[in-house]
Image (cartoon, rainbow, N blue to C red):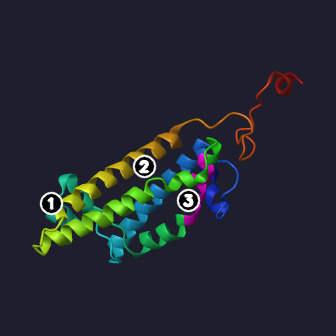
């Protein structure tokens, strides 16, 4: 249980390194609590939906909109945003990568979203002035952003660098040479 809440204890700590175990146990904690809070939101009528009616009226494959966050789940998401960002940055540090890589998907996704919106507005108002091109460029950028996000996901699964790196000591505390082991 300690691994699940360790990032909350290190709320604003963007320095140092975090192991895979800390990152993924915290992620599991976030998923479990978010689901429970969404169910409570739905039961109390605080904006979430987890009823059979929402599944019946949902037109997406598998009824993916059947469980949406309400007030409690959204407050929890806002409260855990900073520690989630901090543990992701420390996880990148464990791989000897800059924490700034966490922003890698953001640029293409934001610009892609803007271009998609411009394309949609152009298509809806009937002017058609470059709407298709803007929408296509937006889709390409969204795809690039998705690839960047996938790269980050793969990195989060990778083993950290052994021994100290430029961001600090190995969080596993593993000795890296013979003198440290037998000295």
Label 2 neighbour load within 10 Å: few <14, some 14-19, many 20+: some
x and y percent of residue 2 in the render? 64, 52
Give the Cα separation between the discs numbered 3 and 2: 14 Å
> In the image, what residue occupies the spot 63% across and 51% down?
90
Secondary structure at badge 1 equals loop
On the image, the x and y values in percent for residue 39 come to 36, 66
* In this view, the mark in front (3 or 1): 3
Relative horizontal placement of residue 177, taking residue 91 as reference (left or right): right
Front-most of residues 126 and 51:
126
The question of residue 90 being in magenta is answered with yes
From the viewer's perspective, is 132 left or right of 77?
left
Q: Earlier in the sequence, mark 2 or mark 1?
A: 1
When asked about the image quadrant of residue 133, the answer is bottom left
Disc 3/disc 1 C-alpha distance (Å): 33 Å
Tell me the residue that label 2 is attached to. Answer: 149
Question: Which of pointers 3 and 2 lies earlier in the amino acid sequence?
Answer: 3
Residue under pointer 3 = 85
Q: Which mark is residue 59?
A: 1
Residue at the (44%, 56%) spot, across then down: 31
Magenta region, residue range: 82-92
**Number of marks present in the image shown:** 3
Question: Is residue 153 located in the magenta-colored stretch of the structure?
Answer: no
Magenta stretch mostly in which secondary structure?
helix
Q: Percent position (x, y) of residue 45?
A: 32, 77
């Amino acid at each position: 249980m300690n691994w699940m809440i360790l990032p909350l204890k290190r709320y604003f700590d963007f320095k140092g390194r975090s192991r895979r175990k800390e990152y993924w146990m915290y992620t599991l904690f976030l998923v479990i609590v978010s689901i429970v809070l969404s169910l409570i939101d739905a039961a109390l009528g605080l904006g979430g939906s987890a009823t059979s009616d929402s599944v019946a009226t949902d037109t997406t494959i598998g009824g993916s909109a059947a469980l949406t966050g309400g007030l409690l789940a959204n407050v929890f998401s806002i409260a855990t945003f900073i520690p989630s960002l901090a543990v992701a940055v420390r996880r990148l540090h464990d791989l000897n990568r800059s924490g700034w890589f966490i922003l890698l998907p953001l640029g293409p996704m934001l610009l892609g979203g803007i271009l998609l919106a411009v394309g949609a507005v152009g298509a809806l108002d009937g002017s058609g002035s470059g709407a298709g091109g803007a929408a296509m460029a937006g889709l390409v950028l969204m795809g690039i952003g998705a690839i960047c996000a996938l790269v980050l996901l793969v990195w989060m699964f990778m083993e950290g660098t052994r021994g100290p790196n430029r961001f600090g000591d190995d969080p596993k505390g593993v000795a890296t040479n013979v003198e440290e082991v037998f000295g």
